[in-house]
């Protein structure tokens, strides 16, 4: 397992913790942030890309959707 795969697993764990915290305290923003961390972690683990690169691509997709 390389460094980026390990970071991907960590992001998934961090995301799951944020989701649980969001559920406990009825905080939708924290829950959503946790979901994003989890998905980014899964993509990072599978592709070996950096978290920053994946988050930038997601941001670009959102901006492109806003222009439609």
Image: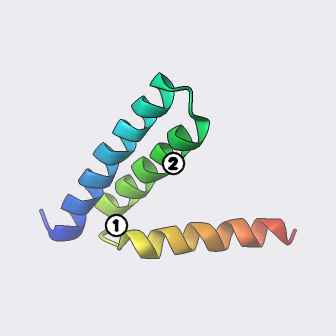
Residue 48 screen position, x and y as percent: 29, 70
Residue 61 screen position, x and y as percent: 66, 68
Q: Residue at x 41, y 30 (%)?
A: 20
Q: Please name the residue that numbered disc 1 is placed on.
A: 47
Rendering quarter of residue 56: bottom right
Indicate left or right for 14 with 5 as reference.
Answer: right
Seen in the picture, residue 18 relative to 6 is either above or below; the reply is above
Indicate left or right for 7 with 64 as reference.
Answer: left
| Residue 24: numbered disc | none
Seen in the picture, residue 68 relative to 13 is either above or below; the reply is below
Residue 16 screen position, x and y as percent: 36, 38
Q: Residue at x 52, y 38 (%)?
A: 31
Q: Residue furthest front?
A: 25
**Residue neighbourhood size for the residue with mark 2, other residues' Cα within 10 Å, grouped as few (<14), some (14–19), many (≥20):** some
Colour scheme: rainbow
Q: Please name the residue that numbered disc 2 is placed on.
A: 33
Frontmost of labels 2 and 1 is 2
Asked whether disc 2 touches disc 1, contact meaning CB atoms under 8 Å apart, the reply is no
Q: Nearer the viewer, residue 14 or 1?
A: 14
Say which quadrant the N terminus sits in.
bottom left
Residue 37 screen position, x and y as percent: 43, 52
Indicate left or right for 38 with 63 as reference.
Answer: left
């Amino acid at each position: 397992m390389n460094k980026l795969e390990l970071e991907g697993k960590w992001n998934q764990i961090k995301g799951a913790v944020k989701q649980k915290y969001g559920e406990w305290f009825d905080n939708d923003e924290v829950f959503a942030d946790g979901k994003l961390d989890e998905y980014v972690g899964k993509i990072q683990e599978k592709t070996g890309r950096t978290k920053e690169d994946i988050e930038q691509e997601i941001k670009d997709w959102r901006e492109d959707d806003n222009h439609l």
